[in-house]
Image (cartoon, rainbow, N blue to C red):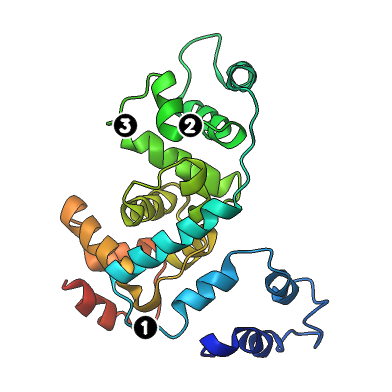
Amino acid sequence: HKVNDNKLMESITQVHQFAPNGDMKNYPYCSYSYLTEGNTDAVGIIKNASGDEAMTLAAFENAMNKQVKLKQKDVTFADEPFTIVMEQVQRRYISTKGNTTESNVIFIISELCDRTKYSYKKVASKMGIGKKRRDILIGVVCDMVIRRKYTIDTIIVKLKLTKENKTAIIMETIAELNRVYSYSYDYILSLLGIQDCGYNLLSTLIRGINEQFKEEFETICLKFHLQGDLKPLRAKCGL
C-alpha cells in the first residue's frame, strides 16, 4: 500500500483496516491507536519516506538532520546530580573484585547520559575513555536502543552528538546490532525508528562491509536476513 503524503492519516487507516478482528482501534496487536495518538516518531518517518524509492544517501542524511533538529525541541532531559548518579552506577556496575567489564562501562555511560544533562563526550572524558574508542560510543548507542527503547534521533540528542556524522553512527549501529544479536536489517531499522527506501543506506553498508572485511555479497545478505529478489540490490552495490 502506497502511503499518500497529502492524506497520511487516511492511508494509515486503510493499512490498518485489515486487523484480524475487524476492529483496528481495539485489536491489541494493531498499531493504529499508537500512531493516531502521536505516541511515536513513526508518523514523521512515514511522511519523510512516503513513496520516495529514489532517496539518495545524501537525502537520507538531510532527512535525519531535520528529524534530529525537531527532536531537540521535544526531548526532555533528566537533570539528576551527576555525582549522585555516578555513585549509584558505580555501586551497581563497578566490580570490587577485579576489572570492570567494558559492557558495564557502557551501561554506566548510558545511564549517566540518560539521567543527567552531561553529553557522551563529557561523561566519557570523566571516565577516562579516549576519543579513539569509537566502539564504546557505538556500544552506548546500541544499549540505549535495546535497553532504553530510544530511537536513533532521541539517542543523538540525548548524547549530544548533533555535530557527528549521523549516517556513520547509524550504519555502525546497524552493523553492531546485527553482529551481537543477529537481528535482521528490517528489524534493526524498526528499532532505530527509521526507513531506508530503495535500500540506499543498505547498499552503502554492504559495500563498506565488503571492502573492510572482504565478505561476499551473499554472506552479508544472509547475516541481515535479506529475502526476495536481491539482484537489484547487488547491482546497486556494484558487487
Q: Which type of secondary structure does the marked residue at label 3 adopt? A: loop
| Marks 2,3: beta carbons within 8 A | no
Mark 3: few/some/many CA within 10 Å (<14, 14-19, 20+): few
Identify the residue position indicated by label 3 in the image: 133
Query: How many angstroms separate mark 1 from mark 3 (CA)?
Result: 36 Å
Identify the residue position indicated by label 1 in the image: 53
Q: Quadrant of the C terminus?
A: bottom left
Residue type, mark 3 in image? Arg
Q: Position of residue 234 (x, y in %)?
A: 23, 76
Identify the residue position indicated by label 2 in the image: 106
Query: How many angstroms separate mark 2 from mark 1 (CA)?
Result: 37 Å
Residue type, mark 2 in image? Ile
Q: Is residue 231 above or below residue 85?
A: below
Along the polypeptide, which appears first: circle 2 or circle 3? Answer: 2
Residue type, mark 1 in image? Glu
Along the polypeptide, which appears first: circle 1 or circle 3? Answer: 1
In this rendering, does residue 237 appear at all? yes
